[in-house]
Image (cartoon, grey):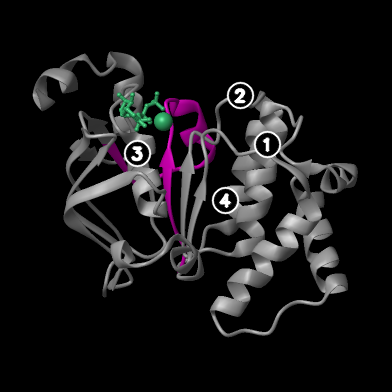
Amino acid sequence: MTPLLQIKDLHAEVAGKKILNGVDLTIGKGEVHAIMGPNGSGKSTLAYVLAGKPDYEVTAGEVLLNGADVLAMDPDERAAAGLFLAFQYPMEIPGVSTMTFLRSAMNAQRKKRGEAELSSPDVLRRVREEAGMLGIDPEMLRRPVNVGFSGGEKKRAETLQMSLLEPRLCVLDETDSGLDIDALKVVADGVNRLRSKERSMIVITHYQRLLNYIVPDVVHVFSKGRVVRTGGKELALELEANGYAGYLEEAA
Ligand SMILES: Nc1ncnc2c1ncn2[C@@H]1O[C@H](COP(=O)(O)OP(=O)(O)OP(=O)(O)O)[C@@H](O)[C@H]1O
Ligand SMILES: [Mg+2]
């Protein structure tokens, strides 16, 4: 069976600085992989490169989603192909209500896939239903995207967006940062509801705690722009106990 995601010897730089140094990563359908690693090791950069953020230049390597060349696609084509990135620092969009934003995101993606657009009442129903499950106050949907949202509210809003877009590959960049324990559970439940045989996830996190709720199939340690170790979920416990010191030397 073709893996959902294959990253082969990926190298990338930002502003002339080499950040990814040969990332190799293969994710099967339905699998959840955690990526852990020290600050500045390139985890967010990997997420940005996957999403096609401008200014991130790929200098070598390959990324295949379901066998298709991701690096040849525009960011909106990547989204239509089923890639979703939940940002470490979600963007604020003044002047655009969250509901309007969600409706355009859902319909833009459907259009790109050649599917019929959803009617406004259909969008409203779906959004309200998902928002309810994530404990999002309907009042928030009228507010401009992420503007003035608390850290936890932003993370819930990202999870809402993700549930509505039904991606094939979700990349969650520190979705747990800034969440209180209750919010962590709500977001983790939201993510777990999305787990399926067809959908895979990359969960970037610093904390073993999140992985108690979103239990990964595979854990990778990232250091200096590449994967330096891969193991099962017990690897996260080992990191929590011992830190990254050993890996920093290994990658040097
Ligand atoms: N636009 C940029 N210009 C210069 N350096 C950059 C730029 N963007 C990222 N970097 C550098 O790339 C390195 C990797 O950053 P990245 O955000 O990917 O790390 P990270 O592993 O996600 O860290 P954290 O755990 O703190 O989120 C850092 O040293 C960062 O300063
Ligand atoms: Mg980061």
Closer to viewer: mark 3 or mark 2: 3
Viewer-side residue, 157 vs 246: 157
Q: Which residue is mark 2?
A: 178
**Who comes first in sequence, dot 4 or dot 2?**
2
Residue 85 horizontal/vertical position (percent): 49, 50
- Disc 2 crowd rating (10 Å Cα; few below 14, some 14-19, many 20+) is some
Cα gap from disc 4 to disc 2, whole angstroms:
19 Å
- Disc 3 crowd rating (10 Å Cα; few below 14, some 14-19, many 20+) is some
**Do the CB atoms of the residues marked 4 and 3 lie less than 8 Å apart?**
no
Q: Quadrant of the N terminus?
A: bottom left
Q: Which residue is mark 3?
A: 45
Q: Which mark is residue 89?
A: none
Residue displayed at 17% across by 23% down? 247
Q: Amino acid at mark 2?
A: Gly
Residue 36 horizontal/vertical position (percent): 34, 31
Viewer-side residue, 104 vs 195: 104
Residue at disc 3, CB closer than 8 Å to ligand 1: yes
Q: Which residue is mark 1?
A: 154
- What's drawn in magenta, residue-wise? 198-220
Q: Which residue is mark 4?
A: 192
Q: Secondary structure at mark 4?
A: helix
Cα gap from disc 2 to disc 1, whole angstroms:
10 Å
**Do the CB atoms of the residues marked 4 and 2 lie less than 8 Å apart?**
no
Cα gap from disc 1 to disc 4, whole angstroms:
18 Å
